[in-house]
Amino acid sequence: MRIFLLIPFNEGFTDISNVIREVVQKTNHQFIRLDEVIEPPISITDAFHKEIEKADLIIADVSNQNPNVMYELGIAQSLNKPTLLIAQKGEIIPFDISNRRIIFYEREHLFVLSRELQRFLQGANVNDFTKKSATNSPKKTMVFISYSHIDTEYLERLKIHLKPFEKKGLIDIWSDTKIKAGEKWKEQIEKALEKSVAAILLISADFLASDFIIDNELPPLLKSAEEKGKLILPVVLKPCRFTKDENLSKFQAVNNPNVPLSKMDDNGKEEIYVKVADYIDDLVR
């Protein structure tokens, strides 16, 4: 796709532009920014209209509601161009575009923006970015939870914190507790692994000692994280060799691995579950 970026042309947005450029090129699409393609004697207005007409997808940063960006976005919308909006977290989005797909980002965590853009653009179809139909329900985001059955109590408490997302129809939490008697359990797990866009790993010595987890669940999760940008959220439950595992230690744990949940009081544990919920909130946005 030919992807046209609408963003303020100042140093304050250089980091955002660079993140978008990197992801667009990494996913084998063409990145276009107006100030980089203008050639005299063509005017800025003529160049903009030319590029907007050729674009397959518009990415617009509507942070601070920059007048130029909002004007250009209006032109793109009048031409019915597929649009993906991004904005700094906490921004108030004008009501007339608030029902469009929006990725919120934080300057301190631009890897989240990178990951979400990659997830959307990986094999993307232009139709994926058109305005959501009011008659269609939003597609649920599947979240896979990998754990040892010995640590079931931690799973159940985490699910309580994620329940509000389920009730709103935003996510579908999958763990092997969903497998019904008589179902082909391995096939069910493989389907869930394939469909999920995020995985929460509840890590302990029992987790690391599970042949099934290490041999069957982790390989596709790690491969999908590398190739498709799947979100991996390790939560260290008990003292274990998480930081010594060459595959798992590549991922930033939600909590300090040296302070596992088993060492925390109830309030400390709840704070970690809230952090996991915050990550999922960013994901479904």
Image (tube, rainbow, N blue to C red):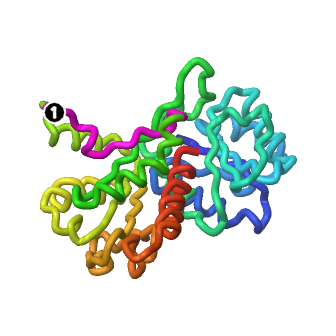
Q: In the picture, residue 133 is in which quadrant?
A: top right
Q: Tell me if residue 240 comes above or below residue 283 in the rendering.
A: below
Q: Is residue 177 magenta?
A: yes
Image quarter (top left, top right, bottom left or bottom right) of the C terminus: top right
Q: Which residue is painted at 54% across and 21% down in the image? A: 136
Taking the image as shown, residue 76 lies to the left or right of residue 244, namely right
Q: Is residue 32 magenta?
A: no
Q: In the picture, residue 251 is in which quadrant?
A: bottom left
Q: Position of residue 206 (x, y in %)?
A: 21, 67
Q: Which residue is painted at 27% across and 80% down in the image? A: 244
Q: Which residues are magenta?
A: 168-181
Q: Which residue is painted at 66% across and 34% down in the image? A: 100
Q: Position of residue 76 (x, y in %)?
A: 73, 34
Quick check: can you spot residue 117?
no
Determine which residue is flagged by label 1. 181
Q: Which residue is painted at 25% across and 53% down in the image? A: 220
Taking the image as shown, residue 75 lies to the left or right of residue 99, namely right
Looking at the image, the residue that sits furthest to the top is 135
